Amino acid sequence: MSLDLPNLVFDPAEMMSRDELSTLQSSRLREFVRRAADAPLYEELFARLGFDPRAVRGSEDLSSLPLTTKEDLRRHYPLGLLAVGRERVARIHGSSGTTGKPAFVAYTRRDLKTWSGLCARFLVAGGLREEHLVHVAFGYGLFTGGFGLHAGIERVGAGIVPAAGGNTARQVMLLEDLGADVLVCTPSYALHIAEVVAELGRDPGALKLRYGHFGGEPWTEEMRAEIERRLGLVAFNNYGLSEVMGPGVAGECRERAGMHVAEDHFIVECLDPTTLKPVPDGQPGELVFTSLTKEACPVLRYRTRDIASLDRRPCPCGRTGARLSRVMGRSDDMLIIRGVNVFPSQVEEALLRVEGTAPHYLVEVSRPGALDEVVVKVEMRVQEFSDEMRQMIALRDRIDHEIHSITGVRMGVELVAPGTLERSSGKAVRVLDHRKEPARKG
Amino acid sequence: MKLQQLSLFLENRPGQLRAPCEALGRAGVDILTMSLADTAQFGILRLIVKEWQRAKAVLEGAGMVVNVTEVLPIEVDDRPGGLAAALAVIEEAGLGVEYMYAFAARSASGKAAIIFRFENPDLALGAVRARGLRVLDGDELVAMRT
């Protein structure tokens, strides 16, 4: 259901017809692949594969292009993607790598202008106006969130409080005393702000926040509802990653039924992580992006490892960019059960549908005979526990039904005693795979 | 009178039944009667205890998930046909019985107590009394054991 918000569009390109978009993508791709060959990473990759960039006539040749992975970037540390002379580099950002060294991305002045325009698109789609004051609680540094959103807000012409990260009590004071209308940060930080407001005994109603733009990590509809309830604002999702640009790759409109990808700047594919073939729209697959306009660090078919689905149906807002669902998980989390790709986040979704909130759960996979067997252990909580046996059985059956409905796989559901599943301070362990073969890497 | 019955979720594996009983024992809580309903994977242990609030706190403190349900202890003649007679009255009153179980002791005057869980305990309380059944209270149950 669309929000009661005027449908303002920052860039008319957002409303381009699918035909025009297709033609634009094709011609941009052709030119772009040739320029990409100037980057050491692609020069080496094309040579190694015997790939001729001039053979790419348009989007129809997309699948003939090699994929780029994070490992490729690491191998060409620090700036293997750089396709222009160093003197043209106007900015460098980076994302934290799990192996210690960041993955750097560079921008020319023109890239920075493109980038700020992309951020402006989703900010405006989500209610931002010139007269607003925006509180930016993203870190300002190598991380693309702070500077990226800052530039986007400046393009819209709105005011900025560059609060950056940390010292949440001070952030609350700034929000109260300066009366910002819009909040920008990660969804978990937004919740943290709400918690600190409560801890300090402050009245969340005293905050003037109307809209929030949250991204940088996957988050659920349940979290959105909680953030909205606790901060009294309307929350919008946006998606991006530094290797592809930063924030601004996709963002929600007032329909909030998926995030529109800026397809005039990125070709988006949704691929099966093992076969690397496109999955049908609506089905989950790994997001792969090809930039069409980046100068400093062109990126071709970059594997994000993020799992989501695409929706190319027309959106009531009129924007024609394909819509991305929420990111459901990582392709590295993926399980293959009886030939079907299953993600732990799908099990979590099933539990959310049955209960409204997800209890602790564990997916155990084994192969006692010839076939894979899965048992989902679900920890009992007071809200699920009924004194009536048939209600308990009905609960278990409902969970079983939802899991089957979402994943297509019939799993056993076991209700287990509270506190029996392992807790962790980091990411929760959701899967135990007892099968002898190592999980196939997607 | 309505009684507060505690019910616990028990996973079907070793130690699950002993744990709550041990916790209650250590806390000096007196169990008056109990019933265990089971499926292949899990069970529900239902307990009538002397101090239900304290018992609930003890069990929750031990990490268990506890529900409180209102049940009615109905007096029944302790002879063949006694239970059937009471059930006839209940059926005639149109009341649905979710489950029932017997109280462990019997009174000196040849009466037994059966714990009944009705869908609507308040409605059931009025209806069974109106038809001549006696609903016991907690003190009477305790007295039956001596």
Image (tube, grey):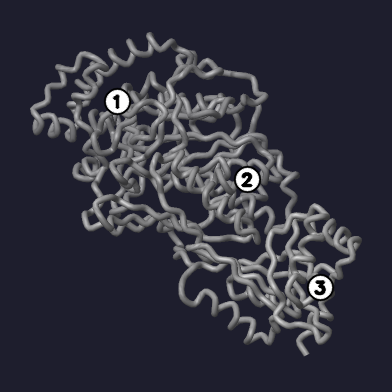
Report if the CB atoms under discs 1 and 2 are less than 8 Å apart: no
Assign a secondary structure to mark 1: loop
Question: Mark 1 belongs to which amino acid?
Answer: Glu
Q: Position of residue A71 (x, y in %)?
A: 23, 44
Report if the CB atoms under discs 2 and 3 are less than 8 Å apart: no
Report if the CB atoms under discs 3 and 1 are less than 8 Å apart: no
Assign a secondary structure to mark 3: strand
Residue B117, compared with residue A24, is above or below; it is below
Q: Chain of mark 2?
A: A
Residue A218, compared with residue B94, is above or below; it is above
Q: Nearer the viewer, residue A265 or B97?
A: B97
Residue receiving disc 2:
A226
Q: Position of residue A137 (x, y in %)?
A: 55, 44
Looking at the rendered structure, whether the residues under marks 2 and 3 are on a common chain is answered as no
Question: Mark 3 belongs to which amino acid?
Answer: Glu
Question: Mark 2 belongs to which amino acid?
Answer: Glu
- Please name the residue shown 63% across and 74% down the image: B59
Cα distance between the residues tagged 3 and 1:
87 Å
**Crowd rating for badge 1 (residues with CA inside 10 Å; few <14, some 14–19, many 20+):** many
Residue receiving disc 3:
B75
Of the two numbered discs 1 and 2 in the rendering, the one whose residue sits closer to the viewer: 2
The answer to whether any part of residue A140 appears in the image is no
Q: Position of residue A84 (x, y in %)?
A: 24, 28
Relative horizontal placement of residue A55, taking residue B134 as reference (left or right): left
Furthest residue in direction right, as rendered: B130
Residue receiving disc 1:
A295
Q: Nearer the viewer, residue B117 or A123?
A: B117
Cα distance between the residues tagged 2 and 3:
50 Å
